[in-house]
Image (cartoon, rainbow, N blue to C red):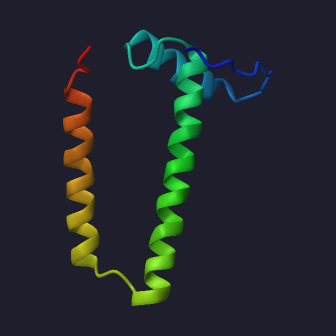
Amino acid sequence: MLRMKDRITISVEPEVVQIAREDVESGRAPNVSAAIEDAVVTRKRSRALSEAIEMWEEEFGPISEEARRWAGKELKRAFQEASSSTPED
């Protein structure tokens, strides 16, 4: 089932438009709207992760640099795996 989307008009810097167009040209996004939408959703997830880390540190104390490095490596590996896999139909 297709979800209806809201149509809006936004103003962004020319560099932002260029980045979105490059995503389309390279196949990372089907269109400019999808590229912008992906960026906003990614920002939302990043904010949620930051909030979760903040809550963790309030309860258990600061996360060590060693743990941060490990998590960074694991996230990078997971993103690489996700971007190299193709969805099954």
- Nearest the eye: 46 or 2: 2
**In the displayed structure image, the side of residue 9 where residue 35 appears, left or right:** left
The front one of 89 and 12 is 89
Q: In this view, does 86 lie above or below 12?
A: above
Q: How many marks?
A: 0
Q: Is residue 46 above or below residue 57?
A: above
Place residue 84 in its image quadrant.
top left
Residue 61 appears in the picture as rendered: no
Please determine whether, in this image, residue 88 is positioned above or below residue 45: above
In the displayed structure image, the side of residue 34 where residue 74 appears, left or right: left
Can residue 75 be seen in this snapshot? yes
Q: Where is residue 57 in the image (x, y as percent from the top left)?
A: 44, 83
Residue at the extreme front of the image, as rendered: 1
Residue 51 picture location, percent across and down: 54, 67
Question: Quadrant of the image for the N terminus?
Answer: top right
Q: Where residue 37 sits: x, y (%)?
A: 58, 29
Quick one: quadrant of the C terminus?
Answer: top left
Q: Residue 83: where, in percent of width, then height?
A: 26, 30
| Camera-side residue of 4 and 32 | 4
Q: Residue at x 20, y 57 (%)?
A: 73
Q: What residue is rendered at 27% in x and 41% in y?
A: 79
